[in-house]
Image (cartoon, grey):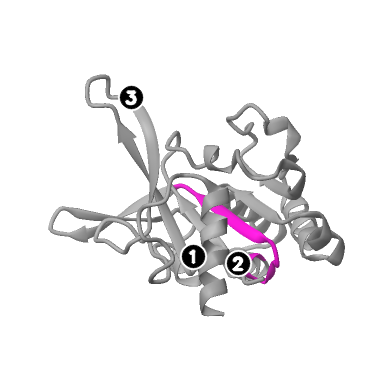
Amino acid sequence: MNVTPVLIVGESGTGKSTMFKDLPPARTLVLNTENKSLPFANADQFCQVRIETYNDLLAYLDMALSPEGQAAYDYVILDSFTSATEIINRYAEFAFRGYDQWKNYNSIIVDLIIKLKKMTQQVFVVAIPEQKDVGFNEFKAYARIKGKELKFGHLEKEMAIVLFTNPIYEMETGEMENVEMLYKPNKNTTSKAPVGMFEVRPPNNALLISEAIKAYYGRIG
């Protein structure tokens, strides 16, 4: 089966975590670096592991990559990449000194991305956006990564599918009533997807997105 990691980028409260509620709980591994509960009723049925240290993160990534992990899980969620970089930064500050801190930090982030891309499961990587001034009072949103060398596009460059949450608000109350996913490249986000994978903006539903990915690669495979 052809799989490719999906990067999900959005502000807090715009439906990033909610999109996973329809995935099969017993077949879904959630690497929770945010130390927060999933915001839906059946969250306790998912295999959630709290990631507090770099060693935790490494151990569960290696488990997911192992034959046992591949047999146990069809979906792997890293929620979030942004906070995972903060965990890795704390490790680098403790383990290394001077220039070696950033050198090893960057190396570990690159290794993390490689591990995510090697997984046979459908992987969803969640991130918070960070805006970059691109001139003429315009800004472009990228996945937030701590540090300088990997900021503003490195993660997106490694991902074939980058989806941004796009909340739909009720006109009178201003309340969020729906969320759709931006998938076409535009001047304000780094969203992208292979041509023809989506015909319309998909809803924030990871199961439907996963099925669209399988169908797409089934057609071109």
Residue 116 screen position, x and y as percent: 64, 64
Label 2, secondary structure: give it: helix
Mark positioned earlier in the residue sequence (2 or 1): 2
Q: Residue flagged by tag 2: what amino acid is it?
A: Ile
Left/right placement of residue 204 relative to residue 22 reads left
Reading the image, the residue beneath label 2 is 113
Q: Is residue 132 above or below residue 203?
A: below
Spatial separation of the CA atoms under disc 2 and disc 3: 36 Å
Could you classify mark 3 by the number of other residues whose Cα lies within 10 Å: few (under 14), some (14-19), or many (20 or more)?
few
Q: Farthest residue in the front direction?
A: 219
- Residue at the extreme bottom: 221
Between label 2 and label 3, give the one nearer the viewer: 3
- Direction from residue 152 to residue 85 in the image, left or right: right
Indicate whether 39 appears above or below 19. above
**Amino acid type for the residue under numbered disc 3:** Glu
**Which residue is drawn at the image coordinates 39% and 62% (left, top)?**
152
- Magenta stretch: residue 123 in it? yes
Is 27 on the left-hand or right-hand side of 108? Answer: right
Which of the pair 149/205 is nearer the observer?
A: 205
Q: Label 1 belongs to which residue?
A: 155
Image disc number at residue 175: 3
Secondary structure of residue under mark 1 = helix
Residue range of the region highlighted in magenta in the rendering: 116-128
As drawn, the residue found furthest toward the right would be 68
Mark 2 nearby-residue class (10 Å; few <14, some 14–19, many ≥20): some
Q: Are marks 2 and 1 in contact (CB under 8 Å)?
A: yes
Residue ID at (60%, 38%): 21
The amino acid type found where label 1 is placed reads Leu
